[in-house]
Every structure is written in structure tokens, then in C-alpha cells.
Amino acid sequence: MDLQIALILGQDGVTNGAIYALLALSILLVFTVTRVLLIPLGEFVSFGALTMAAVQSGTPNSIVWLVAGLAVVEAALDLRVRLRSPSRRGIPLSMVLKVAYAFALVVLMYQLPLADLPMAAQVLLTLAVVVPLGPQMYRLFFQPIANAPSLVLLIVSIAVHVAMVGVGLLLFGPSGAQTKPFSEAGFELGPLMINSQSLWVIAMSLALIIILYQFFERTIYGKALRATAINRVGSQLMGISPVFAGRASFLLASFIGTLSGVMVAPITTIYFDSGFIISLKGFVGAIIGGLASYPLAAVGAVLVGLLEAFSSFWASTYKEVIVFTLIIPFLLWRSLTSRHVEEEE
Amino acid sequence: MLLKKITAAVALATLATTAFAQVKVGVITSATGPIALVGIPQKNTVPLMPKKVGDLTIEYISLDDASDSTASVTAVKKLISENNVDAIIGPSGSPNAMGAIGFVAEAGVPLLAPVGTAAVVLPMTEQKKWVFKTTQNDDIIAKALVEHMAKNGVKSLGLFGTGDPYGENWSKVMTALAEKNGIQIVANEKFQRNDTSVTGQTLKIIGAKPDAVLIAAPGSSAVLPQTSLFDRGYKGKYYQTHGAALDDFLKLGGKKVEGTILAASLMLVLDEIPDSNPAKKVAAEYMGAYEKMYGNKPATFGANVYDAGLLLQKAIPIAEKKGKPGTKEFRAALRDALEQTKELVGAQGVYNMTPEDHSGFDERGREMITVKNGAWALLK
């Protein structure tokens, strides 16, 4: 192995690591705010990638019907809650808007000349279609059991994941898809040829991380989410709605997941079930961060990417084993060094 | 509700008594789960299979195992104990079929496995006697590839396969064959179907400077290694296995897979096959019927199940002389009849079973194919 190979592998590892880092951050965010270990995060990645591929090939995908259907179910549930409470009557505007939005997507998907849209519009459309699934998922599956023990939340999370994989097969079919790169350009840096897609991935990941940081530090909503993560009951007493916090964290997670899918789709072939293994590597990163520290989780995820790249060169047969074995020493180290906190039930 | 059930039961009972004697065939496919790509065309093929042989009707009971080996075994047990089937076609996956062998052998039910790995019929054992395989053994395909390599002056070869039974078996078969033909294997790398990048393996293979690279991966996962090698500037010859023989391979690979050489079923290049090839007619019939029903062309995996139907169609009348369908004698006779299949023309080639060879293909079961202008073309 010479310097050039090491550089290429390093670049590859950092590119994948950047994606894992984003996913690690979403897992961490959702976990600290809602105590849900977001296993279906990977489905946003694959749904994002496959929707993007469908848009690029100009075939409207029925995923919009899934979004519309869930919006209707959501509205029906909200309405039932409303009718039962004697004080408030009538249909609120937000509910109407949500359903209208979902059906507007259906119209857009079937009416727009999908394949001829500029790339940015295709990305926006993909995000507009897939991201709402996050808050919908929270509303339908997690909000009713928001106070359940975390084991129950984990089981529901796994169930949602399995169901979403099945839905993915139904919507997108069994064959894989790859999308066009954002740009074909490549840059030469000394002995290293950097393709622009990796630069896109790294730049967008960095930008997202900075935006998230600013969001949590400077805005009232970000602070509300942080407060919920630190002390759920205390923040509720201060007037932060746990329903809002849950929905907002799922919205952010589905946004990040979908965007990761759109970014990774030009690099590799994505199948309906690919997302899980990608988000699992983000999860390893989050574990390295002890499911508590954002910077450590991001560093851990990049480490996973690098380890993966180098082990695929040295011992490709055992690559997956090496990456996932990494979790054991870190868990040991974590449980030996950190104070064990009993979960409040 | 109860009334409805009673009516249905009565209707069924009358039907059962008036209908012809019936052969029951269980079909297990992976129409959902990770290998749905293989399972869906197989499941879709079931309605196209022969429904009548002589005065016997054939009833197909189709189950899905969600690509899960445990579910395959459950399905096998259910078909045997509840449905009392005379034969089983399936399951779609190699590990799934391996798991089912013990149970079909114990119950004495012939299993026609449309799976890739030769391990289900080789080496032949007392249990595997009950298993027949309706795909080309890897070594038949491999021989064709190695012959082509030797003829074209390939001296060193890089193997790039999946880290699953498919890739492992190919690396085993190729290591033995390459050595015999004086080809040196200079790199043997593995990757996973869901990998987002295979850069590490690609660099290692390019570093070993082989004359040609063989990519052994099932389905569209065969694309990523090749495009990765192409992007890194590998200029040697690219070989693929019959696992890549899907239109998705062309769609995903685009210009980067131009000139790839593979050996696979004649279905890919049907129009170019001479009419003298007996399998052409059967394949055309099958593909026509499939396209009429579903509006798209079947993947070769579907033909594996179709051929299983043809094998049964030929064997059932012979077995009928020894016993009534649904009895142990009939099943044993069916197995013997399947084993004696001679010159049966299927959609993928000609079957000649022997007690040692339960796959039965010869060189008529494969064609040398290349990618030319973004389409499959017969290699001349």
C-alpha cells in the first residue's frame, strides 16, 4: 500500500463516513428527545434514493399515495380526538392544510414533466414527498405510546422498520437503482483524483452539521428540543409540548435520512432494503458517542467509514465483521468508565 | 357466515368427488424480502405451468417464504403434512433450499430447486437423491468462461465476488478450473450486496494487474464492482457470471459495462439463436406467455421454475403407472421418473438426468453472450 492508495481509501472512507455521521446525529437526536431508537431511519435513506431515481427516470411513483393515505389516517385520528373533547369543535386549518399538501404532492408527481426538471427541483420534490413520512410515522406509531418503557418503543420501532421494508418492496420493486451524479466534474489534487460527488457529500454533510448546530444553539425551537432531551418532565412544565418535540425530531431525522439517500444514490446502487445496513453503521457511530454526545458520534461515524474503507482493502471478506465488532470494545469501555444511570420509568 | 362456510364446504366436497384425480405440487418462492428479485418472476411463472397431464389435473399451491430460511422450512413442512403434496418446486434461495433437503428426504417428496448453488445436488448423498436442480451448475458456466479466457490469452485473473454462498462457490469452482488451464488467480476479493463502496477491493485488484476480472455476484449487485473498476481506469477484460444476466445490469451499468463477456441462458439473446436449438421454441413460448400476462419479459429465474413444471409434466404419467397421486408409492415413482429424464427440452437447455447428475445440463444450457451497444448480443 502506497500513499496514493491510502489517500484514495481515505477519501472514500470520509465520504461514506460523512453520510454515517449525519445518520448517527439523527439517531442521537431522536433518541435523546423521544427515547425511540429510530431503526426505520434507513428506510428514509432508501426511499429518498429510490424516489429520486424514479423522478429522474420520469415515472411517477405511488409513494405519494402512501403519504396521502397516511395524511388522511392522521387527520381522521386527530379529528376523533377533537370530537371527543367537549371544549373544542370544528376542523382546524392545519389539519386541512396537511391533507391538502399531501394531495398537492400527488398532483405534482403525476403532472410535472419529472425527467426534464432541473436536478435541484428533482431533489426538492423528492424531499417534499419523503420527508413528511417522518412526522406521520411519529404521529401514528409513537405518539400514542410516548410514555411507554423504552423497550416497548424499541419493539415498535423494529416493527415499523419491518413494515416499511415491505412497503418499500411494494412501491419500488425488487431491483436496485442508481441516480445521475450532481455533476460529472472531477478534480486532481496531487496524485489524487477526487470526484465531485464525494465533495458534494462531504460539503453538504458539513453544512448540515453547522446548520444543525446553529439551530440548536440559537433558535427557540432548537433550544426547546435540547431542553426536552435534557429533562423531559421539566421542559414540559416549562410549556414545551412533548408532541411538538417528538414531531420536530422525527421531521429532522426524516429530512436528514432522505437527503443522505439522495446524496448516496449516485455513488452506489440502492435497493429497497439497503437503507438498514447504512443506518446501522451510523448507529455504530452513535454508540461510540455513547448515545449522548453529538461531536463524539460524528467522529465515531467517520471512523466507521474509514475503518470500512481500509478493511475492504486489506481483508474484504471480513469487512462487515470488523466494522460491527468495533461496537463491542466501545460498549465495554463505555460501561466500565461511565456511571450507570437507571432509566426513570 | 356459517351458512356460507357450509355451502362452500359442500361445493368443495362435490367438486372433489367429481374432479379428475389430482396431483398436488407445492411451490415456494421468495416473492418478498432481499431476494425478491429472483422470487417474483418465479411466483409469476406458476400460472403458466402445465395444468393437466393425461387425465390428471395438476394443482399448484404457491407459498411465499419472504427470503427467510426458517420460513422456507415451515412452508415445506406445511405442504407435506397439511396439503399432502406430491412434489415441491422451490425455494428461491440457495441457503433456503439447503435447509429444506432434510425434510423432503425424510417425507420422501421430490424437490425441484430452482437455485444457483450446486451444493443442493453435489456431492450426491442419500438425502440429496430427492433433490433436482433446474439451473445450470456453476461449473458448466465456469468451463465456458475459462475456455474463452484461455483462447484469448488471459494468463492472470482477478476474482471479485459476493461474500455469500454464490460468490464463495464461484471462487471455489474458478480456483480449480483456472489452475487446470494455466490461468493464475492473482486477486480474490469479496464484497457485500449492500455495500455503498467497493473502492478498497477495486484498488487491490488493479494493484495485482490481472489480464481479466471475473465478477461473481447475483442480480444487479454485479454492477457496482464493474463500474468501480471502470472508473478507476481498469483496462482489462471483464467477465460476469449468469448471475448478472438481467436487463437491470444493462440499465444500471450503461456504457460502463460495454463489452462484458458472460455465459448464460439463451433467453437473453433469443432472436439470435438458430432455430436448430431445440430450447429456442420452448423459451419463446414461455417468454411470450409471460409477457402476455404481465406486460414485461421474465428474468431467467422464472424459467427455472417453468422448467421444473416441464420436468414434472414428463415424469407424472410414468409415475402414475406405479401408484395413485397422494400416496408414498407415487412420490417414490415420481422421483425415479425424474431421475430417468432423458433429452427433455426446457426453456434453458436440454435436461439429461442421471443418478449422479441431478441438474442434467450440458453445454446446450449456456450461450456466450456479450454486451454490445447497451444490449445483449451473442458472442461470435
Image (cartoon, coloured by chain):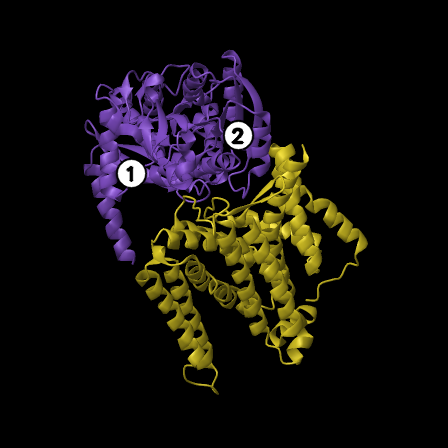
Chain colours: A yellow, B purple
Question: With respect to residue B90, does B153 lie above or below?
Answer: above
Q: In which quarter of the image is residue B30?
A: top left
Residue B29, image quadrant: top left
**Residue A193 at x, y = what percent?**
57, 42
Residue B302 pos. (x, y %): 33, 34
Q: Nearer the viewer, residue A92 or B142?
A: B142
The three-letter code of the residue at mark 1 reads: Lys
Between residue A167 and residue A11, name the one nearer to us. Answer: A11
Tell me if I can see residue B26 in this picture: yes
User: B76 left or right of A345?
Assistant: left
Name the disc covering residue A227, or none.
none
Residue drawn at x 50%, y 56% as measured from the top left: A44
Crowding near the residue tagged with mark 1, few <14, some 14–19, many ≥20 C-alpha atoms within 10 Å: some
Q: Which subunit holds the residue at mark 1?
A: B
Mark toward the start of the polypeptide (1 vs 2) = 2
- Residue at position x 20%, y 36% in the image: B19
Mark 2 = which residue? B160
Question: Which element carries disc 2, helix, strand or loop?
Answer: strand
Task: In the rendered structure, find residue B297 and report the number of the disc placed on it.
Answer: 1
